[in-house]
Amino acid sequence: MKNTPLGWAAHNGHEEVVKLLLERDDIEPDKADEDGQTPLFRAALGGHEGVVKILLGRNDVNPNKLDDDGETALFCAAEKGHEGTVGILLGRDDIDPNIASYDGQTALSLAAFWRHQGVVRLLLGRDDVNPNKPGLDGDTALGLGAWNGDEEVVRMLLGRDDINPNNTDWGGRTPLWWVACSGNEAMMRILLERDGVNPEGPDCRGQTPLSCAAENGNHGVVEMLLGRDEVNPDGPDNKGNTPLSYAAMNGHEGVVEMLLAQDNVNPGKLNKEGQTPLWWAAASGRDGVVGILLGRDGVNPDTPDMNGHTPLHCAAMHGRVEVVRMLLERDDVNPDRQDKYGQTPLSRAIRHGDTRVRALLQAQIALTRSTD
C-alpha cells in the first residue's frame, strides 16, 4: 500500500510527527493513498484520537471524503468500535453520519452489526441520523442488531420515535421474522413490546414469523406469537403450507401439539398441491408427529395429493418403515390404492428397493384380499 509520510504517521498515531509534517507548505493533509484513504481515515481506523483532533483542526481536511470502497472516517471508526474517535468526528457540524458505503451500509448499521453499543448510542444522539436507512440487501441497523441478538442495541434503536420496526430486507423479512427463526425469546419479547410492530408480517414467500418459528421448533417463540390476537395460527404461505405443515415436516412434536390446541387450526388442511400436514410428516418419516395427527379427528390418513400420492405412498417410496406400519394399522387406509400414474404403495416400495416396507405392504395386501 503506497502512502504518504503524513498518512503513515497518522496510521501509527504519531502525533508529534503529524504536527511537524503539517507545518510544511508542501504537505497535502487530505491526500489519499492508493486505496483512497486519507490521513484522517487512517487515524480514525486506528482510533488515534489525538491525530484525528489535529487533522480536524485544519480547514483543508474533508471529514466526509470517501475511500475506494465508499467508506468515510466515521464509517471505519464506527465499524471498529472506536467510541472516542466517533465522538470527535460527530462533534463536527459538517459531518454526514448517513453516508453509505458502496454496499449500502452506514456507520450506524455497522456499529449495530458489530454490537458496538457505545458507538450506537453516540450515533443515535444525533438528530440527523437516519435509523431506517437500508443497505443494498435491505438490512437496517435494527434488523442487524436483532439478528445478532444484541438486546441493548435493539432497545436503543426502538427508543427512537422515528424507527420503523417493520422494515423489510430484500426477501421481505422483518427484524421480528428473523428473530422468530432464530428462536431468541428475549429479543422477541423486546420487539413485541414495541407499539406498531407487526408479528404477522410474511416474507416474500408468504411465510409468517409463526411458520418460521414452527419450522425451526422454537417452542417459546411459537407460544409468544400464539398469544397475539393478530397472529393467524393457520395462516398459509404462498404454497399453502401452514405453521402446522412446517412443524410436522420437521418433526417438532411439541410445536405440533401447541398448534393443534388452537381452535382455528385445521389439522387436515391441504396446500396448493393437495398435501396435508400428515402427508409431510409421513414423507419425512416423523413417526411421533404421524402418531399425534392420526389421533386427531378431522385427519384423513388416505388423502392423496395432486399426483395421487397418499401419505402411505410417500412413506413407502421413502422407506419410512415405522410410518408405513402405523398407517397400515388404520382401517381407513387403502394399501393398494393407485396414484395418477397407476402406481401403488407396494410398486413404489419395490421401485425404490426397501425390502422391509415391501414385506409390510405385501402382508397387509394379502390379509385384506383374504378377508374380502
Image (tube, grey):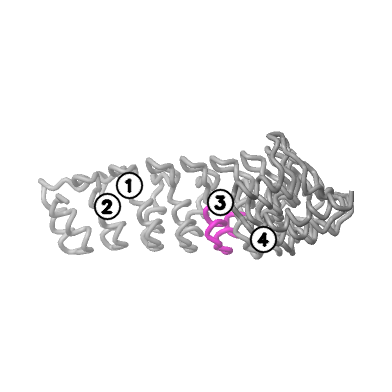
Q: Earlier in the sequence, mark 4 or mark 1?
A: 1
- Mark 2 and mark 4: Cα distance apart in space: 49 Å
Q: Which residue is mark 2?
A: 40
Q: Earlier in the sequence, mark 1 or mark 3?
A: 1
In the picture, measured across the screen, residue 110 lies left or right of residue 164, that is: left
Residue at point 34% right, 46% down? 71
Q: Which residue is mark 3?
A: 143
Of the two numbered discs 2 and 4 in the rendering, the one whose residue sits closer to the viewer = 4
Residue at the limit of the structure toward the front, as seen here:
370
Amino acid under label 3?
Gly
- Please report the bounds of the magenta region as a residue range: 143-158
In the picture, measured across the screen, residue 59 lies left or right of residue 99, that is: left
In this orientation, which residue lies closer to the viewer: 353 or 50? 353
Residue at point 41% right, 58% down? 87
In this orientation, which residue lies closer to the viewer: 79 or 52? 79
- Helix, strand or loop status at disc 4: loop
- Mark 3 and mark 2: Cα distance apart in space: 30 Å
Of the two numbered discs 4 and 1 in the rendering, the one whose residue sits closer to the viewer = 4
Amino acid under label 2?
Leu
Q: Which residue is mark 4?
A: 217
* Tag 3–tag 2 contact (CB < 8 Å): no
Label 1 Cα neighbours within 10 Å, binned few <14 / some 14-19 / many ≥20: many
* Tag 2–tag 1 contact (CB < 8 Å): yes
In this orientation, which residue lies closer to the viewer: 66 or 212? 212
- Circle on res. 63: 1
In this orientation, which residue lies closer to the viewer: 112 or 138? 138
